[in-house]
Image (tube, rainbow, N blue to C red):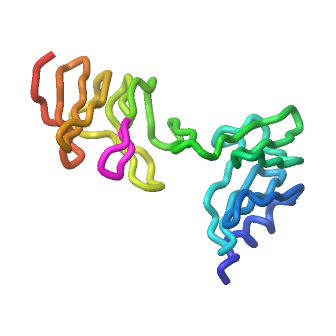
Amino acid sequence: EKFKSIDKFLEKNSVYCGEVLDENRLILGTFFGLIIFEKSGNILQTINKSNGMIDQDVLFIYTDENKNIWKGLNNGISYIQTNLPFSLYNEKNGLHGTVLTAKKFDNKLYVGTSAGLYYKENNQEFKIIDNTIIECWHLLEKNNNLFLSSSYGVFRIENNKAIKLLPE
């Protein structure tokens, strides 16, 4: 029962290789990409061509002493740094424009781009903060508040809204 989602994935994807990442996480390389899951059966991440890999045929996996993942692919070697606190985010996740600033605040990831200020909670897609379809230059946390400097002035971010404090 608890491995139902992994079984469903494996029914559609041939496994080429596998590796133990740490005492709780396992990795499988398939012709559709890479799947990282917990020993309990919970899928943590699926990585393939649609979310950043250059080729999704994972023929070989090696984990180094820092728990980074090296993958042998059809057309080269790819590397995943697992100890970083972020993943690949782009338009497929709702993020638009050129990234200019980012900040984790109040259990949300805020990303300021050339097209606005976006926020993301947990595994949801990015959402734009109202009143911020502007160039967002810098995010600053001060006294438990989040501030945004932009091409249209300075804003305080509160309850997923931008409140203008200073003009441009």
* Residue drawn at the location 79% of the way across and 58% of the way down: 28
Q: Residue furthest front?
A: 65
Most frequent secondary structure within the magenta stretch: strand
Question: Quick one: which residue is furthest to the bottom in this view?
Answer: 1
Residue 4 spot, x, y in % from top left: 69, 76
**Quick check: 152 above or below 15?**
above
Front residue of this view, candidates 72 and 13: 72
Instruction: Identify the image quadrant of residue 6.
Output: bottom right
Residue 130 % position (x, y) = 23, 39
User: Position of 106 compared to 111: left or right?
Assistant: left
Q: Is residue 16 above or below residue 155?
A: below
Closer to the camera, 8 or 153?
A: 153
Percent x, y of residue 102: 39, 33
Numbered disc total: 0
Is 154 above or below relative to 119?
Answer: above
Look at the image and say whether residue 66 sits in the magenta stretch. Answer: no
Instruction: Specify the segment rendered in magenta.
Output: 103-110
Please identify the quadrant where the C terminus is shown.
Answer: top left
94 left or right, relative to 119: right
Q: Identify which residue is drawn at 17% across, 35% down.
A: 156
Quadrant where the image shows the N terminus: bottom right
Q: At x 52% / y 44%, what residue is drawn?
A: 85
